[in-house]
Image: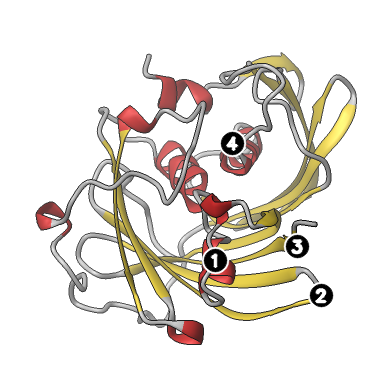
Amino acid sequence: MSALLDLMNLVDVDQDSFRATGHGPAGKRAFGGQFLGQSMAAAGRTIPAGLWPTSLHLQFLRGGDSGAAVDYAVERLYDGRTAMTRRVLARQDGRLITAATVSFAAPLPGPSHGERGGLPEDPATLERTGPAGPAPGLPLDELDIRITDSGVGTDFTRRMYWRATVPVADDALLHTCLALFVTDVYLIDPVLRVHGHAMSDRSHRSGTTDASIWFHRPVHADAWNLLESRSPAAARGRGVVTAQLLSADGAVYATAVHEGMAVVRE
């Protein structure tokens, strides 16, 4: 199994309890996207067929260890006929790392909009840049990432085109988990870019503290996707990034709002 897919391959421990093995160097800070994707994977293991992921809200309470196993405990908050909600707590060595609320719902008839009719650029013609900075421990050889930035100051916009380069099974939950994993790849960077800095220059202590993502349509992680992000506000050492995730045909399949820390290093 590929390293990327193995990240989302949780092991059953007990009823509604699952474990993910460590995949990175021991003692190094775990990547936040790991907890986003794995929390969705754990919640999804308790949901029957026919319900789709609709939202995930996660708080990062402590930094995790990339080399340590993560235990996920799922609490069934609500089971309805067309919607279900789960709470997912992630622990390492008994210490609470993240807390998430995850919702699922059956597709129902209703209004539909959010189709742009295509992507701003053809990602196949862009340079393969990788992420916006170092990413030790991430399976970057299994992700094709191509970044274009535009605008300065509060007009700064990041467009990160991405796709998985390994075969991904026809499993809607798995594709959603992989999209969640990718959303946290330097997503807080626009907070600093507005002011001429970057996460990679280490001028600030930075990282995601809170993440909310709503899914509107199915995701295809092995096709081209666009994560388009901006930062509308920052103050008191924290900043917010809003993002849209678009499919290859320009349809908005998810909306994300992440809060992150951005504190000047002394």
Q: Which residue is mark 2?
A: 236
Helix, strand or loop under label 3:
strand
* Disc number placed over residue 263 in the picture, else none: 3
**Is tag 2's residue or tag 4's residue first in the polypeptide sequence?**
4
In the image shown, does 253 or 157 lie closer to the viewer?
157
Label 3 with label 4: CB-CB less than 8 Å: no
Q: Give me the C-alpha separation between circle 2 and circle 4.
A: 27 Å
Q: Residues within 10 Å of mark 2 (few under 14, many from 20)?
A: few
Query: Residue 129 vs residue 77: left or right?
Result: left
In the image shown, does 66 or 225 lie closer to the viewer?
66
Quadrant position of the N terminus in the picture: top left
| Residue type (three-letter) at the residue carrying disc 3 | Val
Q: Give me the C-alpha separation between circle 4 and circle 1.
A: 25 Å
Number of numbered discs: 4
Q: Which residue is mark 1?
A: 197
- Residue 216 in the image: above or below residue 103: below
| Residue that appears at 64% across and 57% down | 203
* Disc number placed over residue 34 in the picture, else none: 4
Helix, strand or loop under label 1:
loop
Query: Which picture quadrant has residue 109?
Result: bottom left
Q: Nearer the viewer, mark 4 or mark 1?
A: 1
**Is tag 4's residue or tag 1's residue first in the polypeptide sequence?**
4
| Residue that appears at 90% across and 23% down | 94
Q: Is residue 51 visible?
A: no
Q: Position of residue 264 (x, y in %)?
A: 74, 63
**Is tag 1's residue or tag 2's residue first in the polypeptide sequence?**
1
| Residue type (three-letter) at the residue carrying disc 1 | His
| Residue that appears at 23% across and 52% down | 224
Q: Give me the C-alpha separation between circle 3 and circle 2.
A: 8 Å
